[in-house]
Image: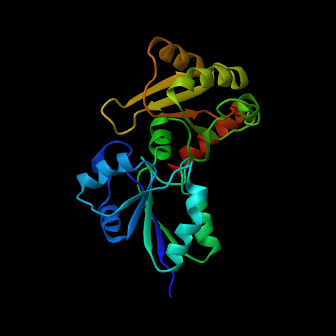
Amino acid sequence: MSHGKLYIVPTPLGNLEDMTLRAIRILKAVESVLAEDTRTSKKLLNHYEIGTPLYSHHMFNEHKTLAGLISRLQAGAQLAIITDAGTPAISDPGYLLVRECIRNGIDVECLPGATAIIPAAVISGLPLDRFTFEGFLPQKKGRQKHLGSLINEQRTMVFYESPHRLLKALDQMSAVFGADRQCAVVRELTKMHEEVVRGTLAEVHAHFSATAPRGEIVMVVEGRRMSKKRDEEMDDEVSEEV
């Protein structure tokens, strides 16, 4: 029997208009949709009149459900995986299932679509000829050590962070990178209260000390600055290209 197929389907960060026509078609056509939180995903599917059955697939059960899902795909099932928002497997469930599909010769197709990384990086105003995505910092142990490993990173860095750890992250980054390092904190992308706060790490810390941060947060942090001479050479190169 031929193998089935796994579809990786991005879902809107907040604005439901960001759902693609192709994503809607795939979610209607597959046998089942694997969802991080079925309650959240049910609202999205109902909005687009998608009646495909939903099944839980999240960080607490993905190891247990893996073998059964691979068996279904090997038997010819067409499945889709979604998360609460954005693209699965990027700091969200999905990586383990994709890896096992590849190991078992099962087709995997990823639809293009919503992710917080790119729009946050673009509107930060920081250089994006090269950048690195660092995901979430460790919640407890290892945060300072991880930041220390990035002290010589010259590329713009993109992080995810929770609102209740944002001030701590800004403090730690100031200690490691210097309080004058440029950054942007992008909050609630695509939603009604979307906000971008740009400035030095110290200035952004002051803003969120006065106004408590809420919602989904992406931090975009300037890389280590090159020498003044190298900066001028880079400016000349850009001017020549233009």
In the image, residue 216 above or below residue 181: below
In the image, 233: left or right of 161?
A: right
Q: Return the residue found at the far top.
A: 210
Quadrant of residue 140 within the rendered picture: top right
Q: Residue 77: x, y in percent?
A: 45, 75
Quadrant of residue 196 within the rendered picture: top left
Q: Residue 52: x, y in percent?
A: 32, 64
Which one is in front, 191 or 121? 191
Q: Residue at left 59%, top 16%? A: 202
Q: Residue 49: x, y in percent?
A: 23, 58
Colour style of the rendered protein structure: rainbow
Q: Residue at left 69%, top 33%? A: 224
In the image, 57: left or right of 28?
A: right
Which one is in front, 4 or 61? 61
Q: How many marks?
A: 0
In the image, residue 142 above or below residue 24: above
Which one is in front, 215 or 228? 215
In the image, residue 113 above or below residue 218: below
Q: Residue at left 57%, top 48%? A: 60
In the image, 16: left or right of 54?
A: left
Quadrant of residue 165 within the rendered picture: top right
In the image, 221: left or right of 16?
A: right
Q: Residue 148: x, y in percent?
A: 76, 31
